[in-house]
Image (cartoon, rainbow, N blue to C red):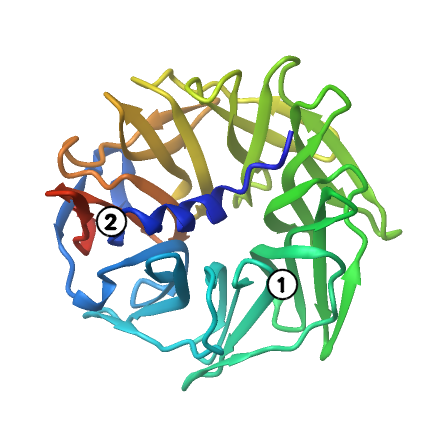
């Protein structure tokens, strides 16, 4: 089977429906009492945009990235929260047809923010914010076509790990870029990896998540830890006879690593999948069944705990899904009424006692969907 490019598919959907972007802020001082409450957004320029990822330095210094779409084309999009309002920060790239987007963001300082994605769905894109503007960063060539960068993490600007996927020889392959000091190198990925979609740092080394494609044609969830020798310790997760896709991975303050995603046996039976562990030892963590097909798209950890976000489908309509890790399982966090919830939450960040999540919503009316920008908060 061909790989499942979730982020690329999300952008492509904008050809038909105009997508708006909700940003979600949760007061996490008492997550057990938290209920997301939607309100109208304060940035009308969000119309037609979709956000993919978030990162936060403080509750008053938050970055979100994605794409601003027009028909089948799109341009990279970034916004900054300064504690009072969202402000767009232009990301200038050459004009071209196709979907150009940012899929991952990592902030180290107010003047040191990195974002990754794709230019027209074929070339890798790395951008850097220096406190004043975004600048494209040149990186080593990655072989193949459909070269998409999906996530970024690191211990600092001189130790960046960027992951993604590429097509070469008629197959999908994982791809990895590493920035050490001022130099970049292409790092061989786990040999089994078809797509890499999440990365976190554990004891100074990257742990990556994604999936491989077995001889039987099914996708197997893949988690791999880098070794000091420059190789990978790889574990496969999932059950035989179904596809398992891991979309994100995060290390919590206690040292546990969480990987989230979903599995399916048919296009209409998406089931949540979460795992906790390290190295080759991974344990499935149970998640309560949802009302319909469901996917987890991102996970983040901080002092407030571990939060995973995604979507669940009810009566054919997607709605936001927010889960909080609780002991040996997960508990669902209220996310507004069904009519108010956005279609999908695709990115989440945790800082101090705050949690931020981003995604998209669609308000239908007439022939096409109409966008509405919103901010969601708790309390």
| Position of 114 relative to 289 (above/below) | below
**Among the two numbered marks 2 and 1 on one chain, the one whose residue lies closer to the N terminus:** 2
Task: Name the outermost residue toward the right.
Answer: 229
Dot 1 corresponds to which residue? Answer: 155
Q: Secondary structure at mark 2?
A: strand
Q: Residue at x 52, y 33 (%)?
A: 260
Q: Position of residue 95 (x, y in %)?
A: 45, 76
In which quarter of the view is residue 144 placed? bottom right
Q: Secondary structure at mark 1?
A: strand
Query: Considering the image in quadrants, where does the N terminus appear?
Result: top right
Left or right, 271 with respect to 29, comes to right
Dot 2 corresponds to which residue? Answer: 27
Left or right, 211 with respect to 102, comes to right
Q: Position of residue 13 (x, y in %)?
A: 37, 45
Q: Residue at x 48, y 18 (%)?
A: 286
Tell me if residue 357 can be seen: no
Q: Position of residue 36 (x, y in %)?
A: 20, 41
Q: CA distance from mark 2 to mark 1?
A: 26 Å
| Position of 184 relative to 188 (above/below) | below
Left or right, 199 with respect to 8, comes to right
């Amino acid at each position: 089977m061909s790989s499942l490019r979730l982020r690329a598919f999300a952008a492509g959907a904008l050809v038909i429906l105009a997508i708006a972007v909700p940003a979600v802020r949760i007061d996490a001082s008492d997550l057990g009492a938290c209920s997301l409450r939607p309100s109208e957004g304060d940035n009308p320029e969000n119309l037609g945009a979709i956000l993919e990822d978030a990162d936060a330095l403080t509750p008053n210094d938050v970055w979100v990235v994605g794409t601003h779409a027009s028909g089948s084309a799109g341009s990279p999009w970034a916004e900054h929260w300064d504690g009072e309002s969202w402000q767009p920060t232009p990301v200038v790239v050459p004009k071209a047809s196709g979907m150009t987007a940012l899929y991952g963001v990592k902030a180290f300082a107010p003047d040191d923010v990195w974002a990754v994605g794709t230019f027209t769905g074929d070339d890798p894109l790395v951008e850097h914010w220096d406190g004043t503007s975004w600048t494209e960063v040149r990186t080593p060539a990655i072989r193949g076509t459909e070269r998409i960068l999906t996530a970024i993490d690191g211990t600092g600007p001189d130790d960046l790990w960027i992951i993604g996927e590429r097509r070469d020889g008629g197959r999908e392959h994982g791809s990895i870029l590493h920035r050490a000091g001022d130099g970049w190198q292409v790092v061989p990925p786990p040999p089994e990896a078809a797509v890499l979609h999440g990365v976190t740092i554990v004891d100074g080394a990257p742990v990556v998540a994604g999936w491989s494609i077995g001889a039987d044609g099914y996708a197997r969830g893949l988690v791999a830890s880098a070794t000091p020798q420059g190789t990978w310790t790889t574990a496969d997760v999932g059950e035989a006879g179904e596809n398992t896709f891991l979309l994100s991975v995060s290390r919590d303050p206690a040292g546990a690593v969480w990987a989230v995603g979903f599995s399916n046996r048919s296009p209409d039976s998406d089931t949540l999948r979460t795992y906790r562990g390290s190295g080759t030892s991974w344990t499935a963590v149970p998640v309560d069944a949802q009302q319909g097909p469901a996917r987890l798209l991102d996970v983040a950890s901080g002092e407030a705990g571990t939060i995973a976000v995604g979507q669940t489908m009810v009566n054919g309509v997607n709605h936001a899904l927010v889960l909080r890790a609780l002991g040996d399982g997960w508990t669902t966090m209220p996310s507004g009424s069904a009519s108010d919830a956005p279609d999908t939450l695709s990115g989440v960040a945790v800082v101090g006692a705050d949690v931020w999540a981003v995604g998209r919503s669609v308000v239908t009316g007439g022939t096409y969907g109409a966008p509405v920008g919103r901010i969601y908060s708790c309390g």
